[in-house]
Amino acid sequence: MNASLNNFNQLCNSIRKAAIRDLKQKRTSSQSAKWQRLLSAILETELTMHRVRSALNLLKTIPSEETLNLFSMSEGAWIDYQYTTWSFWMFGLLERGRSLFKLVIRNLVKPSNPQYKDMEKTLLKSIEVQRDKISKVRHPLAHIGEGGTIEEVTNTELWKNFVILPSPIDFNQILASLVPYRVRWHYFLHQVSMAVFTEIERVSGELIKHINWEKV
């Protein structure tokens, strides 16, 4: 996934430089705590971005049969795992991105912009809308409801074959039904990922415009 993150990277690197500047000057403990919170939020957001990309890349292709056998996995199990992993980490990215941007606004925008509360409400709204959309995928998966694999099964006649069977159920048989959906799922998740990364980039660009680095 080749999403441009120039603004986001510029924002993060500028925060790092400002943190180094203040820490060298040995400012107050409250100042140090502020930078620690910001730098930790950056690290969490960047790591979660990496995990989203990794899950998406792993869903793009199916390993060879030999490789799958090493992990005792079927093609369907691979697809199910990567789809579920992407859903969790994408929701996590929107949560962490929202937290990071809120910290940036309240610690770096606020000193030079008395309208920071309005800006926070406006900018974070788009992130929250994306988060709510992803939650419709993530929450059912987290609570073992109708999401992903279960939804595909229950929306077809396949469910009749499984709900009446005693345990243990052959889940490889259930997950095999996902194989035809892999390309469609990957395309959809790729489009959603691009939209989210683009929104993160847009918000980052807006924040850069409203930070006076001499006042933070």
Image (cartoon, helix red, strand yellow):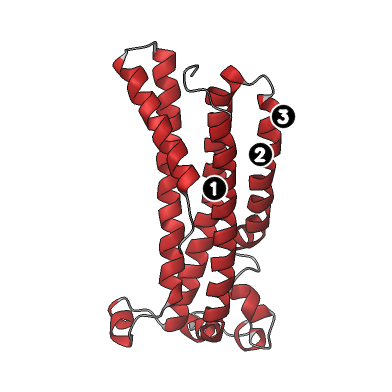
Left or right: where 60 falls relative to 135: left
Q: Quadrant of residue 39?
A: top left
On screen, residue 28 above or below 88: above
Q: Is residue 5 visible?
A: yes
| Residue 184 at x, y percent in the picture | 58, 78
Q: Are marks 1 and 3 in contact (CB under 8 Å)?
A: no
Q: Are marks 1 and 2 in contact (CB under 8 Å)?
A: no
Residue matched to label 2: 123
Q: Quadrant of residue 29?
A: top left
CA gap, disc 1 to disc 2?
12 Å
Residue, far front: 209
Considering depth in this image, is 30 or 68 the residue closer to the camera? 30
Q: What kind of element bears circle 1?
A: helix
Name the amino acid, label 2.
Leu
User: Which of pointers 1 and 2 lies earlier in the amino acid sequence?
Assistant: 2
| Residue 15 at x, y percent in the picture | 42, 30
User: Which of pointers 1 and 3 lies earlier in the amino acid sequence?
Assistant: 3
Residue matched to label 1: 201
* Res 118 label: 3
Label 1 or label 3, whichever lies nearer to me, is 1
On screen, residue 16 above or below 49: above
Name the amino acid, label 3.
Asp
CA gap, disc 1 to disc 3?
20 Å
Name the amino acid, label 1.
Glu
Q: What kind of element bears circle 2?
A: helix
Left or right: where 25 falls relative to 51: left
Residue found at x 59% / y 42%:
203
